[in-house]
Amino acid sequence: MDIKKAILYILVVFVLYTIITSPEKAANMVGLGFQGLSDAAKGIGSFMTNLVK
């Protein structure tokens, strides 16, 4: 459990450091993540639609 907490804290510190030092880069990374999720959802939707036809 302590290792999980330590990794979580390190991850949070890294994210905050990235946001503070380069907000534009952090915003681009978030945008890319959401774009990837959107593309994946569209792909799954297309697959299900074609599966039903």
Image (spheres, grey):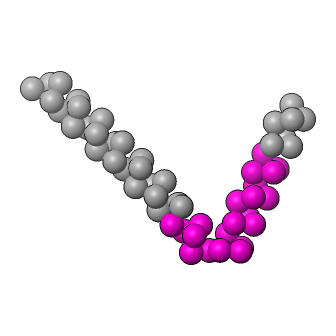
Query: Residue 17, how many percent across, how many down?
Result: 75, 66
- Taking 51 as reference, is 45 left or right? right
- Taking 34 as reference, is 43 left or right? left
Query: Residue 19, how many percent across, how many down?
Result: 67, 69
- Taking 46 as reference, is 28 left or right? right
Query: Residue 27, how many percent across, how many down?
Result: 54, 68
- The answer to which of 5 and 36 lies nearer the viewer is 36
Quarter of the image with the C terminus is top left
Task: Give the magenta part as a residue range.
Answer: 8-28
Residue 9, compared with residue 23, is above or below; it is: above
Query: Residue 45, how many percent across, how many down?
Result: 26, 37
Q: Is residue 23 magenta?
A: yes
Residue at point 48% right, 54% down? 33
Residue at point 15% right, 25% down? 52
Residue at point 42% right, 47% down? 37
- Most distant residue in the right direction: 2
Task: Write down the quadrant of residue 5 in the picture.
Answer: top right
From the image, give the main secondary structure of the stretch colored magenta: helix
Task: Write down the quadrant of residue 6 in the picture.
Answer: top right
